[in-house]
Image: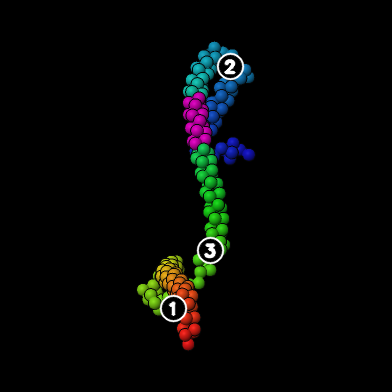
Amino acid sequence: MAIGEIVTDDSLLPVLGTSAETLAQCQQLLALVNPDNVPRESAGLKELSLAVSKQQKILFARLAQLRGQNRDAIFRVRDTKHATAEARQEIDRLHLQLQNLYYEQKHLTGEIAACESYDHNYLSLPLIPVEEFLELFPEHRESSEHDLMVARINHEHSEREKLEQARQELLKRKQALIAENKKRKDDLANLDQDLEKFIDAAKPIQKIFEKEY
């Protein structure tokens, strides 16, 4: 697989181009200094020396350009690593937050299920039927199911308070009647005692009358 197929980043492609040009320049320079190509006459040596010097300058320029591009690539890699680390930290934070939300959702779902399955006391209250309640209070016909249930419970509470008040009044009347009956019994008992005393006191007089007649 060619290096161009491996490296696809746009910022690294110029580095590959400069590297290829530098390699070609090195090959040209090596070809010039190849002993098989070195001329023996002085004029040819001088011309070769000038060509080598020129090619060296070009090579040095290529190498300097390559070093600069390599340095820039290293800085970009560092920046990319830093950005990647920050992104990873953000992803880890979001993942932890998501996990917390998941556990909170699971907890709330369990609480909702427990509430829905809870045997509420109001379900066993002897409330009047909905139809009868709406006939008494037609203003609740458009109420929601929740508000209607609250209104029915409040109505039941009000009715029970009235019944409790009536029961207390009857209890007071009962206690008053019991007290009155007790007083009458006491009065009758006292009357019996007075009557017995009167009879006992009248016995001597009765005996006198019996002797005379």
Question: Does 101 appear above or below 190?
Answer: above
Q: Is residue 135 left or right of residue 13?
A: left
Residue type at mark 2?
Pro
Residue 125 or residue 207, whichever sits in front: 207
Question: Does 74 appear above or below 211?
Answer: above
Image spot of residue 114 (x, y percent): 56, 58
User: Sequence-wise, which precedes: disc 1 or disc 2?
Assistant: 2
Q: Is residue 118 left or right of residue 189?
A: right
Residue 129 or residue 90, whichever sits in front: 129
Marks 2 and 3 sit apart, C-alpha to C-alpha, by 110 Å
Residue at horizontal 59%, vertical 23%? 31
Residue 11 or residue 38, whichever sits in front: 11
Q: Which residue is mark 1?
A: 132
Give the quarter of the figure containing the N terminus. top right
- Rate crowding at label 1 as few (under 14), some (14 to 19) or many (20 or more) other CA atoms within 10 Å: few
Q: Which residue is mark 3?
A: 120
The stretch in magenta equals 65-86
Foreground tag (1 vs 2): 1
Foreground tag (2 vs 3): 3
- Rate crowding at label 2 as few (under 14), some (14 to 19) or many (20 or more) other CA atoms within 10 Å: few
Image spot of residue 203 (x, y percent): 48, 78
| Disc sitting over residue 39 in the figure | 2
Return the residue found at the far front. 212
Q: Is residue 126 left or right of residue 135?
A: right
Residue type at mark 3?
His
Residue at horizontal 56%, vertical 27%? 23
Element assignment for label 3: loop
Return the residue found at the far top. 42
User: Sequence-wise, which precedes: disc 3 or disc 1?
Assistant: 3
Is residue 73 visible to us here?
no
Residue type at mark 1?
Glu
